[in-house]
């Protein structure tokens, strides 16, 4: 499961600085030999002290963390939804990510020109979300026109799709984000025809307020919460690393980690909370899901307490779990397959 996060914002608000801060962290993973795999894509490890502990138990030759891909996306300007600036490129890149980190400038600095000639993060927040809303509205209207034709021909499923698309359209026309409504988000994720649109406004959002704590107004923080988003305050000029953002992004995606632990490799694998054993095994290798027999499982605390697989087995703590088992965060596993 690849986790991808787009860093967005207006020009000169600190997006590239954030990207540089994040990608200073080295990632020891064979699939990603360099921290930056593309001029605008950085691979960053999810901080997890459990990996080091597990690796020491088996003296593993290699340690592979869970990772997040961060995309440094070109600055957004008014009119991006209709192609202004690098609008089309910008919005297509955002669509390819799972979470959006919106960088808002809250600091004052006369030497760094703001595209609007003044620092007003609430205004910038509205500008960004308006562009996302207008782009999504364009896509919803096109899809609605197509499905309305199907509904008129008597296709029953299309009638429901029309009703639900109209609900989404009304939300966007009112200038609101679906992320502010759990009910609407559930509707979007349950409807295949709507989910296919990969709506920008339905992506989870984290707001990074670039400046000091005193620069971020309570009004701004409240506005972000109203949108269903979360925020982090960080002065990017002074901070050297921000693991809080990486961890929060990981949790925002409702992601958890399970581990495999051998002398060759200790590795963290990323899955969505609620994933059953065969699907989790498929993250390691597709054949493991197809030929799944069982998973041998020990929770992290017991694995560490009794010094690994041998000690856990001696104490009757290795469980044999079948296809209905739901993996939990921290499970240490061995997959048995045909």
Image: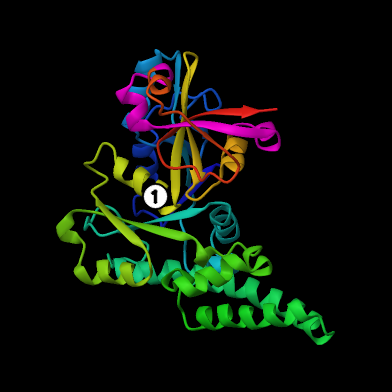
The crowding category of the residue bearing disc 1, from other C-alpha atoms within 10 Å (few below 14, some 14 to 19, many at least 20), is: few
State yes or no: residue 304 in magenta: yes
**Who's the residue at 37% across and 31% down the image?**
300
State yes or no: residue 57 in magenta: no
Q: Position of residue 287 (x, y in %)?
A: 69, 32
**In front here: 216 or 58?**
58
Q: Quadrant of the C terminus?
A: top right
What residue would you read off at disc 1? 251
Q: Position of residue 238 (x, y in %)?
A: 21, 41
**Who's the residue at 56% across and 52% down the image?**
93
Residue 24, image quadrant: top left
**Who's the residue at 52% across and 53% down the image?**
98
User: What segment is highlighted magenta in the picture?
Assistant: 284-310
Query: How many numbered dots are placed on residues in this image?
Result: 1
Q: Position of residue 106 (x, y in %)?
A: 25, 60
> Does residue 53 lie above or below 286 as drawn?
above
């Amino acid at each position: 499961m690849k986790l991808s996060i787009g860093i967005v914002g207006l020009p000169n608000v600190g997006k590239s600085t954030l990207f540089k801060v994040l990608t200073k962290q080295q990632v020891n993973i064979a699939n990603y030999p360099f921290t930056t795999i593309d001029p605008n894509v950085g691979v960053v490890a999810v901080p997890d002290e459990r990996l080091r502990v597990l690796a020491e138990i088996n003296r593993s030759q290699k340690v592979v963390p869970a990772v997040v891909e961060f995309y440094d996306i070109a600055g957004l300007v008014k009119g991006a939804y209709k192609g202004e600036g690098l609008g089309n490129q910008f919005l297509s890149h955002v669509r390819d990510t799972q979470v959006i980190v919106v960088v808002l400038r809250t600091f004052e600095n006369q030497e760094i020109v703001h595209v609007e000639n003044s620092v007003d993060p609430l205004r910038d927040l509205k500008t960004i979300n308006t562009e996302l809303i207008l782009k999504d509205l364009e896509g919803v209207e096109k899809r609605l026109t197509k499905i309305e034709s199907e509904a008129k021909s008597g296709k029953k499923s299309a009638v429901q799709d029309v009703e639900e698309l109209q609900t989404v359209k009304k939300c966007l026309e009112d200038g609101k984000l679906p992320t502010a409504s759990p009910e609407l988000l559930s509707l979007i994720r349950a409807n295949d025809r709507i989910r296919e649109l990969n709506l920008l406004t339905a992506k989870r959002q984290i707001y990074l307020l670039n400046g000091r704590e005193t620069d971020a107004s309570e009004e701004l923080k409240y506005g972000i919460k109203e949108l269903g988003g979360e925020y982090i305050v960080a002065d990017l000029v002074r901070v050297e690393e921000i693991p809080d953002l990486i961890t929060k992004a990981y949790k925002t995606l409702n992601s958890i980690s399970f581990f495999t632990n051998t002398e060759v490799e200790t590795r963290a694998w990323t899955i969505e909370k609620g994933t059953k054993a065969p699907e989790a095994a498929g993250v390691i290798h597709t054949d493991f899901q197809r030929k799944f027999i069982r998973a041998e499982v020990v929770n992290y605390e017991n694995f560490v307490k009794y010094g690994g697989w041998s000690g856990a087995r001696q104490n009757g703590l290795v469980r044999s779990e079948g296809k209905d088992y739901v993996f939990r965060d921290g499970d240490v596993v061995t997959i048995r397959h045909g």
